[in-house]
Amino acid sequence: MSIRVLAVGKKHESWVSGGISRYESRLRKPWLVKWEFMAHSALQKEQARAFESRRLLDKITVNDWVVLLDERGKNMTSPQLSAVLAKELAGRQVVVIIGGAYGVDEHVRARANLVWSLSNLVFPHQLVRLILAEQIYRAQEIYGGSPYHHG
């Protein structure tokens, strides 16, 4: 198993790519991350949200354990995230969704096994990717008993 990240938007910008690569180079199975990008819809607001949500759902299987990143989701500590991911990675494909500029619709929210908020703040999608990569690395290190996390 590994972690698939479905992200609506263009590939990593250069300023974020180096940071993501730094953390990904330290990941070991089953914590490996595979990024899949989907282009933004040319539609606006609700239509874009619905169109992008359908495309995201088409990429998920019934057996996937889905995490939706959303500022209205559950706040978790890094040790809590580590425990959840380690449990799910032991038997299923974990899929993390980063929606587009207008978010995702209720069908995606309903399909998610976990709606997770990185913060009560809203971040640009490129920065979310970097934070996500670091938190997956941190989760791996917590699970393995590494001193990387000092909490």
Image: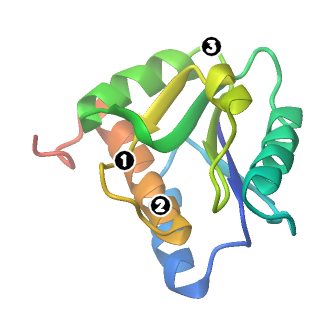
Q: Amino acid at mark 3?
A: Gly
Crowdedness of circle 1 by 10 Å Cα count: few (<14), some, many (20+)? Answer: many
The answer to the question of whether label 1 and label 2 lie on touching residues, with beta carbons closer than 8 A, is yes
Left or right, residue 73 beside residue 13 = left
The secondary element bearing badge 3 is classed as loop
What percent of the width, then of the height, locates residue 85?
A: 46, 26
Task: Determine which residue is flagged by label 1.
Answer: 118
Q: Amino acid at mark 1?
A: Leu
Foreground residue, 72 or 62?
Answer: 72
Task: Determine which residue is flagged by label 3.
Answer: 91
Quadrant of the image containing the C terminus: top left
- Looking at the picture, the colour scheme in use is rainbow
What percent of the width, then of the height, locates residue 100?
A: 67, 58
Foreground residue, 41 or 91?
Answer: 41
Left or right, residue 42 beside residue 135 = right
Quadrant of the image containing the N terminus: top right
Q: Amino acid at mark 2?
A: Val
Q: Nearer the viewer, mark 3 or mark 1?
A: 1
Whole-angstrom CA distance, mark 3 to mark 1, is 24 Å
Task: Determine which residue is flagged by label 2.
Answer: 128
